[in-house]
Image (spheres, rainbow, N blue to C red):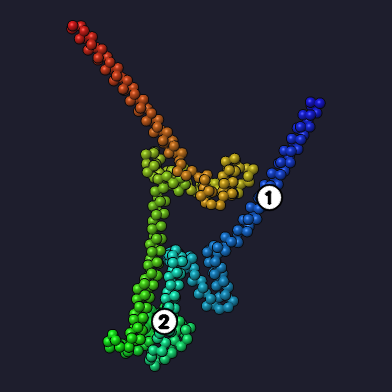
Amino acid sequence: LGAAGKGLVNTACSAKAALLDSEQLKSWKVGKRLKGATKKLRAPYHLCSSGYFWYIICIQMSSTLSLLVSPFWMGGLLIIYFGGTDAGTVILGGLLRNGMDLINTFILGLLSLFMFSLITYMAFRDTPIGEENPSYCNTLYQCVGSHMISGIVDGSIGVLFRETLWSDVPENIFSNSNLQARSLMVVIFFMVWQYVILNVFVGLIASAFEAMRQDKLFIDVDSMSKCLVCSRHMYDFSSGEAGFQHHIEIHHDPLNYIFYLHYLKVTPDEDLTDTDVAIKKIMTEHVIPKDRAKWLPANKALSLKTQQAIEEAKDEERFKLLQNLQAAVADVLLATTAAAAATSSADT
């Protein structure tokens, strides 16, 4: 009975274990399929959000249209200057860095043009403007369009009033207030457009290029003074025998880590070690770059640990020598004191 009971228990346990294994295997397969489907769904989004993808599309469309429609479409291939040359890439990067600020400033300029055109339409629509341009503001739409053209192209709305702006200057402050208000509006628009809005454009572009230079300088200094893998400073390796250059070329060579990631990607899981599987799991399950880099030796280096252990051993040896020296000095003092006491007692 005891043997039969044990057999039944073992059979039930093995069946339960097999059932659990099959359930776990099924859930693992389902999770893997879901992850694969999620990656497939994310692929079009990443592709459409890539600037290089649209760069290639523009080149292909220009080439196709120039072949099928007209050779003038070859002009679209000039976009290669911004995507294939260093100078074009720097210019495009400077414009994109403060892109939203530039767009907001452009919208501010359009709003200012609309505001001045509205003032002109309401207050100065019936003011004589000369025979060459008898009509420029009969409707609000025409008034806004005239201000847009004159403001953006000429940088002043004074050209709308032609010769009357100069010939109808009032003789004193109390005569013809309408013309004085019109002249004041033209001067205010010129100051706002030329000295504020256009200078804001120039300042934003100049600050973008300056920020790009600062970023490049910071990256160059950081790459020359710190290890790309462990982020330890070059001065930390100054007391060692090999030095910082040996550390970044042998111990923490970034290409070795790239090759290791490629090895994890192409090698089946059954051929990997437990450490490799754990690192591969971290890389596949986490999306945030900070979480995916947990396995990297951040602020750690075995050469520094070895060097630190050597320094600690030397310090311990120096401490022992100091203790022995103190003990020897104490013995000498005791012997000297005892000899002096013996001498004094003999004299007595």
> Sequence-wise, which precedes: disc 2 or disc 1?
1
Q: Residue at x 53, y 66 (%)?
A: 55
Q: Is residue 11 above or below residue 139?
A: above
Q: Is residue 315 above or below residue 330?
A: below
Q: Residue 273: x, y in percent?
A: 60, 40
Q: Say left or right for 214 vs 3.
A: left
Q: Residue 239: x, y in percent?
A: 37, 39
Residue at the farthest left position: 347
- Residue marked by disc 1: 30
Q: Residue at x 35, y 86 (%)?
A: 178
Residue type, label 2: Ile
Q: Quadrant of residue 113?
A: bottom left
Residue type, label 1: Val
Q: Give me the disc on residue 119.
A: 2
Residue at the farthest bottom position: 131
Compare residues 173 and 19 and report the one nearer the observer: 173
Compare residues 133 and 171 and report the one nearer the observer: 171
Q: Quadrant of residue 199?
A: bottom left
Q: Residue at x 30, y 88 (%)?
A: 175
Q: Residue 343: x, y in percent?
A: 21, 9
Compare residues 5 and 49 and report the one nearer the observer: 5
Numbered disc 2: secondary structure:
helix
Q: Residue 329: x, y in percent?
A: 29, 20
Residue 39 visible in this rendered orientation of the protein: yes
Q: Say left or right for 126 vs 65.
A: left
Within-10-Å neighbours for mark 2: few <14, some 14–19, many 20+:
some
